[in-house]
């Protein structure tokens, strides 16, 4: 079956702009999580959506937001971009059950560069 | 809070050498433990997992055993190949409440022919 698809793969934006990233999870997966990867901070959790509701949230400013649609596809938005937002943004999907297997499958990521 | 500590890299080995990448964790309860691998320019791929104490995860010749008494999940492989060159991440997922993955800092492995 198809894996997790993230679009676009690469983005270049100017400081102060906003950006929207998209993630299509594996068919049947209802949970989508977003992570930011930078050389300095490593992999950090942004938020998780399950059945169109944000279920968990990491320690990021309000400029970072997301949403999930009824087909489980998710978008992440970053407003008022800063140079420090340059990173690889990874999306992961999982079945999302409350207990048991929480295995997450990752997409290839979107490389965002803020200039 | 939860945390994962990995050995610093890079780790440089010759082909067919034995690999160990150390990983220890701090968490309450009984988290699930994972090793992910990231090849250049790619996302993360799940390498193996263990969901309870004494479980051994294995895949593609890699193994790791969930040791609750030492809070460790060390990655091992008996004979590495050049194609194993990548960055390896140890991660945990809490068993209750917030289930986001907490990652270690990653260990770069370079295998020379």
Image (cartoon, coloured by chain):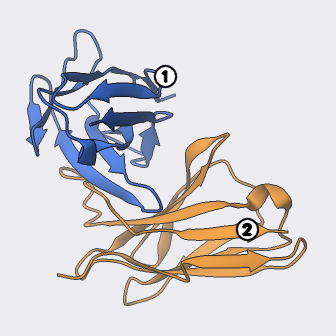
Chain colours: A orange, B blue
Name the residue located 9 percent from the left edge and 30 percent from the top edge. Answer: B56
Task: Tell me: residue A73, above or below residue B79.
Answer: below
Give the residue at mark 2: A113
* Residue A41 placement: quadrant: top right
Q: Chain of mark 1?
A: B
**Residue closest to the eye, B63 or B101:** B63
Q: Is residue A60 left or right of residue A58?
A: right
How packed is label 2: few (under 14 Cα within 10 Å), some, or many (20 or more)? some
Viewer can see residue B74: no
The spot of residue A51 in percent (x, y) is: 39, 77
Between B73 and B62, the one nearer to me in the picture = B62
Residue A53 relative to residue B79: left or right: right
Label drawn at residue B8: 1
Residue at horizontal 33 percent and vertical 43 percent from the top: B85
Q: Residue A38 location, x and y as percent?
A: 63, 49
Element class at badge 1: loop
Pinpoint the chain carrying mark 2: A
Asked if residue B105 shows in the view, the reply is: yes
Q: How many marks?
A: 2
Mark 2, secondary structure of its residue: strand
Name the residue rendered at 18%, 50% in the picture: A100
* Residues at marks 2 and 1, CA–CA distance in whole angstroms: 27 Å
Which residue sits furthest top? B69
Q: Where is residue A76 drawn, in percent x and y? A: 60, 75
């Amino acid at each position: 079956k198809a894996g997790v698809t993230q679009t676009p793969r690469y983005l270049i934006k100017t400081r102060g702009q906003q950006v929207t990233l998209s993630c299509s999870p594996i068919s049947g997966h209802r949970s989508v999580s977003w992570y930011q990867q930078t050389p300095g901070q490593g992999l950090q959790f942004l938020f998780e959506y399950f059945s169109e509701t944000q279920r968990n949230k990491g320690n990021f400013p309000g400029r970072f937001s997301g949403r999930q649609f009824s087909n489980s596809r998710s978008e992440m938005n970053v407003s008022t971009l800063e140079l420090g937002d340059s990173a690889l943004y990874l999306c992961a999907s999982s079945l999302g059950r409350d207990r048991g297997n929480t295995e997450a499958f990752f997409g290839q990521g979107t490389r965002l560069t803020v200039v | 809070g939860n945390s994962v500590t990995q050995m610093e890299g890079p780790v440089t080995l010759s082909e067919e050498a034995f690999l160990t990448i150390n990983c220890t964790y701090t968490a309450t309860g009984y988290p699930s433990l994972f090793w992910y691998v990231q090849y250049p320019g790619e996302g993360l791929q799940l390498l193996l997992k263990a969901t309870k104490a004494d479980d051994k995860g294995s895949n593609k010749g890699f193994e790791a055993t969930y040791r609750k008494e030492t809070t460790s999940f060390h990655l091992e492989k008996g004979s590495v190949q050049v194609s194993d060159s990548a960055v390896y991440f140890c991660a945990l997922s809490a068993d209750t409440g917030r289930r986001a993955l907490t990652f270690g800092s990653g260990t770069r492995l370079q295998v020379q022919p």
